[in-house]
Image: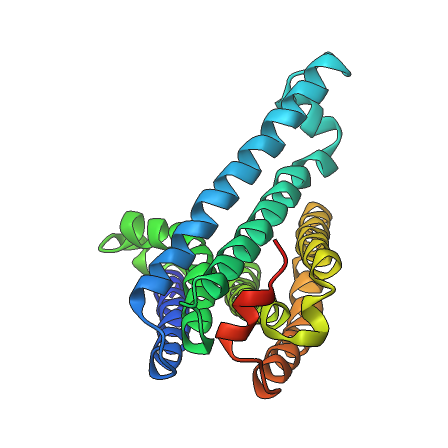
Amino acid sequence: MYVWCQIALIVFCLSLVSAAALIAGRLGGNWRAFARGAAFITVSSFLGGLIGGVLLGLISSLAFHQTYVAWRALHPIAAVIPGVFAGAFEEAARIIAVRRGVRNLSYRLGQVLMFGAGFGGAEVIFRMRRPLLVIITKFGSESLNTPLTPIIGQVIAFSAILAAEIYVFHICMTVVAYRICCDDSLRARARILFPLMVAYHSSLNFIAGCLNWADATLLYGLLFWSILTPLHVIVAVLAIRRPLAPVTEAAGVLPP
């Protein structure tokens, strides 16, 4: 039962990514934008996490005269800092990509949605590595019928909720970035709004890390599923439904 639930989780995540990509494709997006989004988040997340980890290592060594592992054991909150850096780099990469797409007249709504689908899809697919490893190591063995305990069930349900939230969040933020680039009233405030987007993403990563550190996975799932996900859906829908300036006009006045 445990392994079958892991398979169901993978099918759910793949269905999530496929559905969003197909919808974006019907709106004019192509798979090149999907691949570009996946590449941008992969590189930016790796660089952000790496830089955050290196800085923490230097701080723990120089200021506390401890190895990073030992310092993290004493101060578990330090473990969330690489995630904060990763969030900042991911958001900066998204903004750069969307701005360039608008400037080059290659990003319209369908392309933006497809880019967001690839951006969020790469993270969702990356998070499937653990259930995939479970399937590889246990499938075909006697442990295939391992019973599903309440705790394991909660973890699997939480993983599904988190995957949906991550995907909705990334598509929402991609649409918001596009809206800022193409909306006359928002474009003038881009120098303020774009840093706020970076701060918001980093803040969510920080909160998520703190909740995981406190072993509050149910609270984390309830918070993100019942409040943030519907909010992100509403913001994305409003950003799409309101009329936008033609991309050719937006590209000509976008600030450097």
Compared with 247, 220 (above or below) is above
Which is nearer the eye, 178 or 164? 178
Residue 40 in sight here: yes
Horizontally, is 102 left or right of 145 in the view? right
Horizontally, is 47 left or right of 27 in the view? right
Which is nearer the eye, 195 or 57? 195
Which is nearer the eye, 140 or 207? 207
Identified at 62% across, 33% down, the residue is: 52
Residue 156 % position (x, y): 50, 63
Which is nearer the eye, 51 or 115? 115
Horizontally, is 89 left or right of 71 in the view? left
Compared with 138, 11 (above or below) is below
Compared with 237, 11 (above or below) is above
Residue 161 in sight here: no
Horizontally, is 172 left or right of 119 in the view? right
Colour scheme of the rendered structure: rainbow
Query: Number of labelled discs?
Result: 0
Residue 124 % position (x, y): 45, 60
Q: Residue furthest left?
A: 140
The quarter of the displayed image where residue 190 is located = bottom right
Compared with 61, 9 (above or below) is below
Residue 88 % position (x, y): 63, 47
Residue 168 % position (x, y): 55, 71
Identified at 62% across, 87% down, the residue is: 242
- In the rendered image, which quarter contains the N terminus? bottom left
